[in-house]
Image (cartoon, helix red, strand yellow):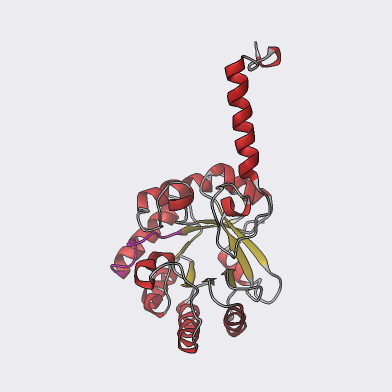
Amino acid sequence: MKWTASKLKALKGERKFPVLTAYDALTASLVDGADIPVVLVGDSLGMTVLGYETTLPVSMEEMLHHTTAASRGVENALLIADMPFMSYQPSVEMGLENAGRFIKEAHADAVKIEGGAVRTELIEALVANGVPVLGHIGLTPQSIKEMGGYKVQGKTSEQARQLMDDAMAVEQAGAFAIVLECVPAELGETISSALAIPTIGIGAGAGCDGQVLVFTDLLGMSGKPVPKFVKKYADLNPLIAEALSAYKSEVESGAFPADEQTY
């Protein structure tokens, strides 16, 4: 079954669902093969794949390249492309044009944009022109310069009210779901209960309708510290290091290639 934005939206109140990032055909095929309904080509690839310190340097061309690659590994999952910093903020027209490129050129099924009430005009325009939109509020990594770093959002009553208002505005504008990042669990559950569309939590508690993690974080591949909200379902980094070390040793000693690897 090919997942669509409307099918994902219909899961609200029916069952919880997982979401994972993927940045190429191989990882996308692994996620898709696990029957995970959503593959998100996140701009987190800036740090996980491209070696940037933040998501801010990620370009449209880089996101289009990786989204296209991921699309080749997906058969059933809903493929969502993260719109990078300054690909939609300057104007609705620019947002429409760049979102269209993800759909036409990179074969995405939907796009994700960060921001609450400030993005309603853009969300409405995208939906009106046939582009499904996943919203994103709370900790929005493209705004870390203004936020002063990666911090939990919605800790005060005023911030919590603003996030609720933003969530309602994004829903009203036509988004099919919304990511809640790094907010207190109680607030995540409150917002989830108030909305008719699914919430996808990342550091927002178990009360959300879905959960998203970064592929390399889930598998423990980076060997670097990860946020509190990450659960490592495997710890591949030491296994990879061990395999590479064994390869190096066998090449240096002449043990590889052996007869069974020789024509």
Dominant secondary structure (helix, strand or loop) of the stretch shown in magenta: loop
Residue drawn at x 67%, y 14% is 258
Image coordinates of residue 86 in percent, x first then y, are: 32, 62
Q: Nearer the viewer, residue 257 or 65?
A: 257
Residue drawn at x 52%, y 45% is 24
Residue drawn at x 65%, y 75% is 12
Total count of labels: 0
Image coordinates of residue 81 in percent, x first then y, are: 47, 57
Up the image or down, 191 lies above or below 141; here it is below
Image coordinates of residue 8 in percent, x first then y, are: 61, 67
Q: Quadrant of residue 236?
A: top right
Image position of 46 (left or right of 36): left
Q: Taking the image as drawn, is residue 138 in sight?
A: yes
Q: Name the quarter where the C terminus is drawn.
A: top right
Image position of 117 (left or right of 10): left
Residue 43 on the magenta span: no
Image coordinates of residue 103 in percent, x first then y, are: 44, 56
Q: What residue span does the magenta drawing correspond to?
A: 82-91
Q: Name the quarter where the N terminus is drawn.
A: bottom right
Up the image or down, 161 lies above or below 221; here it is below
Residue 87 on the magenta span: yes
Residue drawn at x 57%, y 18% is 252
Q: Taking the image as drawn, is residue 7 in sight?
A: no
Residue furthest to the left in view is 90
